[in-house]
Amino acid sequence: MFLNNMYLTKIFSNNEFSSKSTFKIVAVLSLLCFSIYANATNVTPREAVPLSIDQAIKSAQKNDPWLTGSMHQQRAVESMSTMADTLPDPKVTLSLANLPTDGFDFAQEGMTQAKVSIAQMFPRGDVLALKSQQLRIQSEAFPFQRQNREAKVATTVGSLWLDAYRVQQSIALIEKNRALFEQLTDVAEASYSSALGKTRQQDIVRAQLELTRLEDRLESLGQLQNRFNGMLSQWLTQVSFDNKDAAHKQPLIAEFSVYHMVLSQTMPQIDLLNSELVYSSRWHTSQELLPYLSQHPSILALDKKVSATKTGIDIAKQKYLPEWGVSASYGYRADDLMGRSRADLFSLGVTFDLPLFTHNRQDQEVQSAISTTEAVKTEKLLLLRQLLGAYSSGKGRLLSLKDRQKLYKSKLLPQIHDQAEASLTAYTNDDGDFSEVVRARIAVLNAEIDELGINVEEQKILLELNYLFIGSLAESAMRGSNKIQNISMYQSQFAKNGE
């Protein structure tokens, strides 16, 4: 199907084509045949198993050690909560009291005794129950933190996959067009060597220059591909310090090499949560958006932190109450020197402190707890502002990309293809310049790569917006019949990923 210089030269030497127009018609047919062939070529290596975006996200979430560490931290805080609601251990004292030093005779003095004492302290007010409650509330924040982490992992890994996909498909487009420019170079050299047409030496140099530029773009994209593949492999690599666990753990996806990672060829179509809100032409106010964002896992985790610090205020107020202690002791005394029995001694006591000087101690501690609570509330306000800003940025960029997509599909791409076809037709009819054909083909290639970048950027923005609305997804699931366990509901948004 390919026409090379030797074949063209042989044709012209046999005078099978006697006109310049006929030669250029053959050149055009050659390019058309090549285009059909290139479009039918599959760029995926046979031995590589394509990695879909859904597989990448699930594998990253499954292999995230942060989630395992979070569960261990939650168990630790829950254990501390149980421990905090327990009275301190009683203290037992064994002593030998009032032993005379002139002979160390246990029976010499009546005050000498072997004494055993036990003491029990009772903390102020309800401080134990409140400390236990505070730790329990802190432990309730960990599930929301894990949900937020899984949503962030989905967004991060999905964006990396899309970046790697864009580079992979850009390389495929350039590879296809590189062979097309090679064919153009062959045609130009054949036309120049046969003295048919008005092909000039500078046309050949221009075609070879464009081939060199394509080679440079491929090298640059290859470096970028290695970068994104390496960043993606960070989330997909399984590392374990326990060989036994590593042996029994089955990977979610097949083992792969960073330098031979191949992604699915189909652009994923991510479903947008609350699409009617995002695509609405009206920009909603902050108060209208708060119900959608206030259920975000990161916000709910901060709500738990606020509740825990509020409990800290109640704990500080317990310092105004006295701390009580009860003690009891039994003293054994030996018989006196005359053999008469001595009575043993029993003691019972109560101790407590008097919180009298509260201005510089208890009052300041309560004020400190109140300020800590207010500081955590400001963290929540700052986070809500960040989410609102991310929504405004995402919506604006998405609507602009939609306009660009319409412009590319309705005007820009058809016009560029018409220009390429017109320049090729003019060159065939001896009314155009070969360099114009080359420029038109370069414009087509650049436009196709730009359109690919726009489509990929759209999917990345959808990932970012879905992260903002993951709380509303969890809330709707809780109201339904299915009880949500984790952020796996978020993964279902990749159902149309075109595996």
Image (spheres, grey):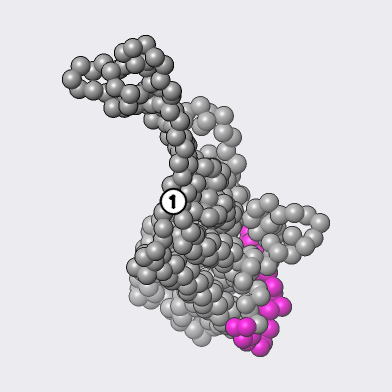
Magenta stretch holds residue 283: yes
Q: Which residues are magenta?
A: 265-287
Residue at 56 percent of width and 33 percent of height: 249
Inspect this view and state whether residue 345 appears: yes
Residue at 43 percent of width and 28 percent of height: 345
The secondary element bearing badge 1 is classed as strand
Residue type (three-letter) at the residue carrying disc 1: Phe
In the image, residue 56 above or below residue 408: above
In the image, residue 138 above or below residue 89: below
In the image, residue 113 above or below residue 227: above
Q: Give the camera-side residue of 298 and 48.
A: 298
Q: Which image quarter: residue 215?
A: bottom left
Q: Position of residue 87 (x, y in %)?
A: 52, 42
Query: Mark 1 = which residue?
Result: 352
Q: Position of residue 391 (x, y in %)?
A: 57, 76
- Toward the left, the furthest residue is 102
* Mark 1 closeness class: few <14, some 14–19, many ≥20 residues within 10 Å: some
